[in-house]
Amino acid sequence: MEITKARFIGSATNVAGKPKTKLPEFAFIGRSNVGKSSLINMLCNNGELAKTSSKPGKTVLINHFLINEAWYIVDLPGYGYANRSKTEKEQITRVINDYLYNSEELEMLFVLLDSRLPIQKIDLDFINELGKRGIPFCIVFTKGDKLGINILSSMIEKNKKTLLEYWEELPPVFATSSQTKMGRKEIIDYIYKILELIK
Ligand code: GTP
Ligand code: MG
């Protein structure tokens, strides 16, 4: 399958503000600046679709993109951006949690991790909370182009090991780059496999 059509539908601060047309949703989350919006643009072959920035904290709302007139990609704000006021942090956490805990259409959450870094405590806490709440998720390593292929695979193996200290088995893991389009086909195929299953 291929993404042939992608368009921005709207932004919301909570589940009540989601688009009126209910369709399966595939959402992207991760620390601020990890590359969520860039990955969405890469998947959609459209550099302008989701707003990106070299400064963390760009995405602050729940953004819905309608794909092939059949399902949504959802761009979420990043968690863990230090340079915000307490009120702003609480507001962002509310937006994220309201979406994650109350979104009946959420089929899969892609949790993005920077492939250059050992997995951070904030990511582990976030992932473990998903487990407790039974939210279906998989793992996406981003910015793979910034590492050589050998270092990339050893970083991913190391991070998988860390996750296996908490989990008996791992969900699917994708290595990606928004620059080289690494992992694009794998993620789109995976989404279509899920869409087939729930048809
Ligand atoms: P927030 O919305 O602020 O939470 O950030 P985000 O996770 O949406 O990150 P965004 O896509 O805006 O990317 C952050 C920065 O990382 C930008 O400068 C991107 O160009 C860069 N970036 C994202 N993905 C990649 C990648 O795969 N490779 C490289 N080299 N840079 C990337
Ligand atoms: Mg963003």
Image: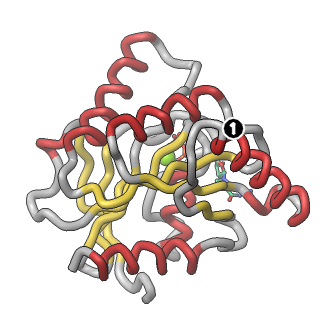
Please state which of residues 106 and 79 is positioned toward the viewer in this rendering: 106
Q: Secondary structure at mark 1?
A: loop
Q: Give x and y (percent) for residue 85.
A: 46, 12
Which residue is drawn at the image coordinates 73% and 50% (left, top)?
115
Task: List the single residue furthest toward the top.
Answer: 86
Q: Is the residue marked by circle 1 packed among few (<14), some (14-19), or many (20+) residues within 10 Å?
A: some
156 left or right of 150 in image: left
Q: Quarter of the image containing the C terminus?
A: bottom left
Please tell me which residue lies in front, 24 or 90: 24
User: In the rendered view, would you say 6 is above or below 169?
Assistant: below
106 lies above or below 67 = above
User: Which quadrant of the figure has residue 20?
Assistant: bottom left
Q: Quadrant of the N terminus?
A: bottom left
Q: In x, y percent, where is residue 159?
A: 72, 45
User: In the rendered view, does 188 fall on the left or right side of 162?
Assistant: left
Q: Which residue is painted at 41% across and 73% down in the image? A: 191
The x, y position of residue 127, in whole percent, is 50, 38
Q: Which residue is mark 1?
A: 119
The amino acid marked with disc number 1 is Ile
Left or right of 179, for residue 61: left
Q: Position of residue 23 (x, y in %)?
A: 19, 67
Residue projecting furthest to the left: 20
Q: Is residue 14 above or below residue 66?
A: above
Specify the color scheme: secondary structure
Residue at the spot 49% in from the left edge and 62% down from the top edge: 40
Outermost residue toward the bottom in this view: 1
At 62% from the left and 64% from the top, the residue drawn is 174
What is the total number of numbered labels drawn onto the structure image? 1
Q: Is mark 1 within 8 Å of ligand 1?
A: no
